[in-house]
Amino acid sequence: MPPISGPARSAALLTAALLLLTACGGSPSEQADAPGKADGYPVTLKNCGRTVTVDAPPRRAVSVDQGTTEILLSLGLQDRIAATATWTDPVMKGLEKANAGVKRIADNRPSSEKVLDQEPDFVAADFESTLAKGGVAPREQFEKLGVPTYVAPADCTAKDNTKDGDGVRTGALTMDSVYAEVRDLARVFGVPERGEKLVARLRERIRKAADGIDGSGTSVMYWFANSESPYLAGCCGAPGIMTRELGLKNVFDDTHDEWPQINWETVADRDPDVLVIGDLTRKSQTAESAAGKIAFLESNPVTKKMDAVRHKRYVLLSGQAMNPTIRTVEGVELVAAGLRDFGLAG
């Protein structure tokens, strides 16, 4: 996902906060009131190159990205989320009531202090950059305190995050990575059957959305944010899932960057048939909302002559649908509906 503004915190600040928590009564894992091991625990996972061991079902999880929060809410685990942070959109439909009781400690990335104030026993994130230097804090800093951490597999499977920007895909992302996250989190919290049911529902929604759609011959572009130097989807992230499921062609499928910044002259030259645009509620970039993006497209002398702009072939998606989350399914559904509305379903 294009960068979310938030203050970077130093390792020294985190260490001081950890010491303060320890002085106040021990580590979060020591404060749990389960006298022995729960059935099925410890749970050990391989996660983004690390081994993660969880000794008991988390009771005070902190989810520092919206995508992981919505998975936990979808699994009925709202009573075990101590806090959440980093939101681009309103909560997914159907989860409003569950989310209402969950404390939000920041709209963007929180400081390490705010996370540690919640006395977490598990910390989960969508992106490796969230739990790294320059993000909330590196994973090892939490793990030194005995707090297990987890990063969505979709952000590290067939992806290189060592370079600048939002990473480079070395292979095409599939929904299997998202399903793996659902199953992992369900297992960590001791509700594996709920995870399987959620995966089955997501699979069925994609099947229904793509049924009868033949997008071959139709080109598409995905715009996440920023009007001056727009973040557009490369070949192989979450938008790539939508593209492949519906048989479309992404006009920028020649780049493996997750969200390359591409000038408008190049966009106009490639002239996609359909524009899929992010409708975000955050404030960290220019042209976050769909209304702002459309106003720009229809007034800019370079873009207003594009075929999709002249015919208003816009599909509006949440930012979470354009990230590799369970809402990518929502993206497939809405792009499919748009193709039908535009007479481009095949």
Image (cartoon, helix red, strand yellow):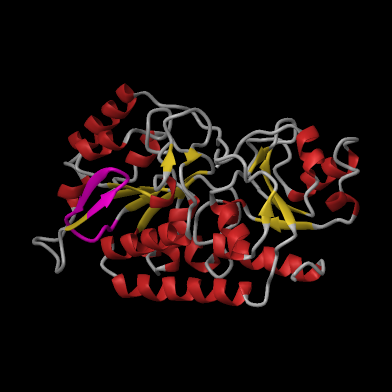
Q: Residue furthest front?
A: 217
Q: Is residue 223 visible?
A: yes
Quadrant for residue 9, please give it.
top left
| Depicted 7 relative to depicted 255: above or below | above
Between 228 and 261, the residue placed more toward the observer is 261
The residue positioned 26% from the left and 35% from the top of the image is 140
Residue displayed at 37% across by 65% down: 77
When asked about the image quadrant of residue 334, the answer is bottom right
Q: Residue furthest left?
A: 36
Residue 48 belongs to the span the image colors magenta? yes
Which residue appears at 64% of the width and 65% of the height? 246
Q: Position of residue 132 (x, y in %)?
A: 37, 33
Q: Which residues are magenta?
A: 45-59
Q: Is residue 127 above or below residue 53?
A: above
Say left or right for 180 vs 339: left
Q: Quadrant of the C terminus?
A: bottom right
Query: Compared to 40, does 226 lie above or below?
Result: above
Would residue 51 be counted in the magenta stretch? yes
Residue 106: x and y, percent? 50, 42
Q: Position of residue 195 (x, y in %)?
A: 36, 70
Q: How many marks?
A: 0
Residue 74 location (% of width, % of height): 45, 67
Q: Nearer the viewer, residue 252 or 51?
A: 252
Q: Is 42 in front, or is 45? A: 45
In the rendered structure, the answer to whether residue 92 lies left or right of residue 302 reads: left
Residue drawn at x 33%, y 33% is 138
Q: Look at the image and tell me in which quarter the N terminus lies.
A: top right
From where the camera sits, is residue 276 visible? no
